Amino acid sequence: MQMPNNVNDCIHCNKCVKKCDFLTKYNMDLHEFSKRDDLAYNCFLCNDCKIVCPKDIDGSKISLALRNSWKDKNYIEKKYKALLFEKKNYIFKNYKHSNTKSILFPGCNFSSFYPNAVKKIADIFRKEYNIGIAFDCCGKPIAELEIKDYEENIIKEIEKSMELSKVEEIITLCPNCYYFLKPRISIKIVTIYEKIFELGIKISNIDFSEEINLFLPCPDKESKFIKESILKLIPQYKDNIKEINDINCCGLGGCAIVNERDIAKGFIEKLKSKNLNNLYVYCATCAGNFNRNKINNVRHLLLDFLNIKENISDKTSLLNRAKFKFY
């Protein structure tokens, strides 16, 4: 990632600072951030700064550019060694059930936090629509470290596995997988919500007549494509869904929590202070982190849509995804 060429267009209006807890902490705007190599791995990559910037400067790209130019990659490899050990060549990958034209791709964290739901969804789509499933990491957590050789190899291996299985369509359950893979892979990528709409699966078992508080995942904040795909399934409740748009991230974005635990904790405390009922997400990473931090009333839209009941399994998340290697 190269430094965005519009960084010097900054007019120092401070809209980004007011929107971002990270920029606020260090009292800097995006132009100043572009000169702070020491803070390369402290940004949550939430994209809130770009959304409010009148010059369309992208703080996530600034952070990734700073990471890309980081000189001591050995230090980064040591600091994130657990993440790299598991995901640079995903140790729990499993393509045994991917021999169909379309396959489900739950990603790491949906499998971690909703293992029983993954099995039920896989069973429904296999029996009713002859859609298989593949277990792999999309590569986004590694890509965010800006270690290019690993990222390129992950994408190459995913494409190779899909081609061997003659997969023509990947159906993502995770918004991070969708946005990360779509511009990088030659195979068609769709969201699970688009597929539900295409297949005509009826969403008739829910009642959102009361206000729903929806926490948007970072990659969907700007385009809101996945949110709009969700609303197509429940148009009658469109006006009842209220976005939570004053919290930058669930706390797990950009691998930044390692360096900014106080900011990540602040996101959680701010959400707790709202004392919200009907709290929904459509990102399993968000759900898992909220639940892990004692926000226990969070629900995932996909489970409600498919009438699946499962509590979040955050205490056994690593074991949960490990088991799918043998599924």
Image (tube, helix red, strand yellow):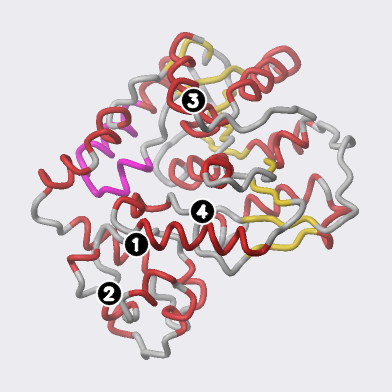
Q: Which residue is mark 2?
A: 33
Estimate the x, y position of residue 189 in percent, counting from the top left: 54, 37
Of badges 4 and 1, nearer the viewer stands 4
- The quarter of the rendered structure image containing the N terminus is bottom left
Give how far apart the Cα atoms at labels 3 and 2 are: 37 Å
Q: Residues within 10 Å of mark 3 (few under 14, many from 20)?
A: few
How far apart marks 4 and 1 lie (CA) works out to 13 Å
Disc 1 packing (10 Å; few <14; some 14–19; many ≥20): many
**Image location of residue 274, percent across then percent down:** 67, 64
Spot occupied by residue 232 in the image (x, y as percentages of width and height):
78, 49
- Is residue 303 within the magenta segment? no
Q: Which mark is residue 250?
A: 4
**Residue positioned 69% across, 40% down in the render:** 193
Q: Nearer the viewer, residue 226 or 83?
A: 83
Magenta region, residue range: 140-157
Sequence-wise, the earlier of marks 3 and 4 is 4
The kind of residue on which mark 2 rests is: Phe
Identity of the residue drawn at 88% across and 35% down: 205
Left or right, residue 112 beside residue 311: left
In the picture, the disc for residue 43 is 1
Q: Position of residue 125 (x, y in %)?
A: 69, 20
Circle 2: element type: helix
Dot 4, how many residues are within 10 Å of its Cα: few (below 14), some (14-19), or many (20+)?
Answer: many
Kind of residue at badge 4: Cys
